[in-house]
């Protein structure tokens, strides 16, 4: 049996997601918010900008930005930006 640790709350769970079933709805909500933000804003200079605009924590943003769901977006500017911090 394989346990995963939730990326949001740290709880252990058994599904194949990166977050536990409790956090899944919040995660999907955040992901939708992020997609809307990216489509509306178009330009953004840092993780903090996106975090302020969406209310999503930088930690979760890093996870979202590297996910397959957002593979269409180019975040190369962000990665090289001086304000990006983990
Ligand atoms: Zn969780």
Image (spheres, grey):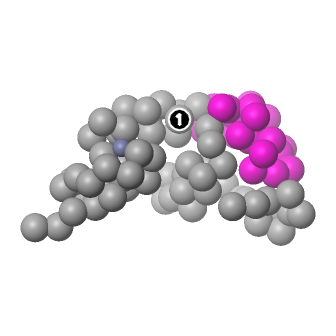
The image quadrant in which ligand 1 is located: top left
Quarter where residue 76 is shown: bottom right
- Classify mark 1 as within 8 Å of ligand 1 or not, answering yes or no: no
Q: Is residue 53 left or right of residue 14?
A: right
Secondary element under disc 1, as helix, strand or loop, is helix
Q: Is residue 61 left or right of residue 11?
A: right
Question: Which residue is located at x 76 percent, y 34 percent?
Answer: 52
Horizontal and vertical percent position of residue 6: 36, 52
Quarter where residue 62 is shown: bottom right
Q: Is residue 6 left or right of residue 34?
A: left
Horizontal and vertical percent position of residue 41: 79, 35
Asked if 56 appears above or below 58 in the picture, the reply is: above
Q: Which residue is mark 1?
A: 30
Asked if 48 appears above or below 53 in the picture, the reply is: below
Q: Nearer the viewer, residue 76 or 83?
A: 83
Packing grade of label 1 (10 A; few <14, some 14-19, many >=20) is some
* Residue 19 visible in image: yes
Q: Quadrant of the N terminus?
A: bottom left
Question: Which residue is located at x 31 percent, y 49 percent?
Answer: 11
User: Magenta residues?
Assistant: 35-55
Horizontal and vertical percent position of residue 66: 57, 61
Horizontal and vertical percent position of residue 2: 17, 67
Question: Which residue is located at x 45 percent, y 39 percent?
Answer: 27
Most prominent secondary structure in the magenta stretch?
helix
Asked if 80 appears above or below 20 in the picture, the reply is: below
């Amino acid at each position: 049996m394989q346990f995963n640790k939730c990326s949001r709350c740290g709880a252990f769970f058994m599904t194949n997601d990166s977050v536990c079933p409790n956090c899944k709805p919040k995660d999907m909500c955040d992901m939708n918010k992020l997609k809307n933000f990216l489509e509306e804003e178009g330009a953004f200079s840092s993780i903090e900008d996106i975090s302020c605009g969406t209310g999503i924590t930088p930690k979760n943003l890093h996870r979202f930005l590297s996910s397959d769901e957002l593979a269409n977006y180019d975040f190369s500017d962000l990665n090289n930006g001086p304000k990006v911090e983990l």
